[in-house]
Image (tube, rainbow, N blue to C red):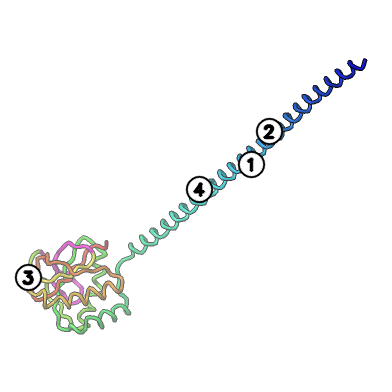
Amino acid sequence: MWLFSEMSLERVSFFSGIANAVFLVSLVVGVAAMYFVFVTAGIKERHWDELRRQSDEQIAASNERAAAAESKAAEAELELIEFRKPRHVDAEQAELIIQRIKPFAGAKYDVGHSLDDRESMDFLWNPEPILPKAGWVHIDWDGGYVFTKPNWPGDHVYGRIGVINVSIEIHPQSHDKLLPVAEALVGVLNEIGIAATVAAFNNSSTNTDAIHLLVGQKR
């Protein structure tokens, strides 16, 4: 009876130890599993947060690009509207031209332009009378294909040429002498927004002692 009791107690103790061990292992496994779940959930949450952040950044960047493109389109449209405006010299600009070129009073010039561009012809209606007010002398174009313009001031002879914008040319024979004259005119025209350049001599005029005021299509 006593022996049986001792064996029973040993068995109980043995199985109790096993049960405790199993319980502890289960507890550890359970805690580990819960930790894994929480860690995994945290990683997934951070992953989705990162995806959301990247998506927000892409949307913001796309909106910025769209806004920039819209702004550039608006600017281009305004530039096109401004470009299509015909060239014109108002009274204030005319006075500025006179002041800037008057130191070269007595300078001779002839005029050439295309017969195919109405804007060029209309534009010349402004500057042609301005230059004589500064003491410059408008002379007839001589050489190549010439034409006249009835009812225009001075009844001058013009040369038919093809250039872009306003081009001031000087015969090589008078280049050094007339370059300051040409640069003064080109400078003030650009200042008032009319594109002009001093270009190499390339026209039919035989007036070697005059600057050649050539007006072409606005570009």
Q: Amino acid at mark 3?
A: Thr
Q: Is residue 160 magenta?
A: yes
Determine the CA span between mark 2 and mark 1.
14 Å
The residue under the point 83% across, 21% down is 10
Determine the CA span between mark 3 and mark 2.
102 Å
Q: Which residues lie in the magenta part?
A: 145-164
Q: Who is closer to the viewer here, 184 or 30?
A: 30
The residue under the point 52% across, 48% down is 59
Q: Which residue is mark 2?
A: 33
Tell which tag, 4 or 2, sits nearer the viewer: 2
Q: Is residue 68 left or right of residue 158?
A: right
Q: Which residue is mark 4?
A: 58
The residue under the point 72% across, 32% down is 30
Q: Amino acid at mark 1?
A: Gly
Determine the CA span between mark 4 and mark 3.
66 Å
Tell which tag, 2 or 1, sits nearer the viewer: 2
- Residue 20 shows which numbered tag? none
Q: What SS does tag 3 mark?
A: loop
- Which residue occupies the extreme front position in the image? 3
The answer to whether the residue labelled 3 contacts the one labelled 2, judged by CB atoms less than 8 Å apart, is no
Q: Position of residue 190 (x, y in %)?
A: 27, 72
Q: Which residue is mark 3?
A: 206
Q: Along the polypeptide, which appears first: circle 4 or circle 1?
A: 1
Q: What SS does tag 2 mark?
A: helix
Tell which tag, 1 or 3, sits nearer the viewer: 1
Determine the CA span between mark 4 and mark 2.
37 Å
Q: Who is closer to the viewer here, 86 or 80?
A: 80
Q: Which residue is mark 1?
A: 42
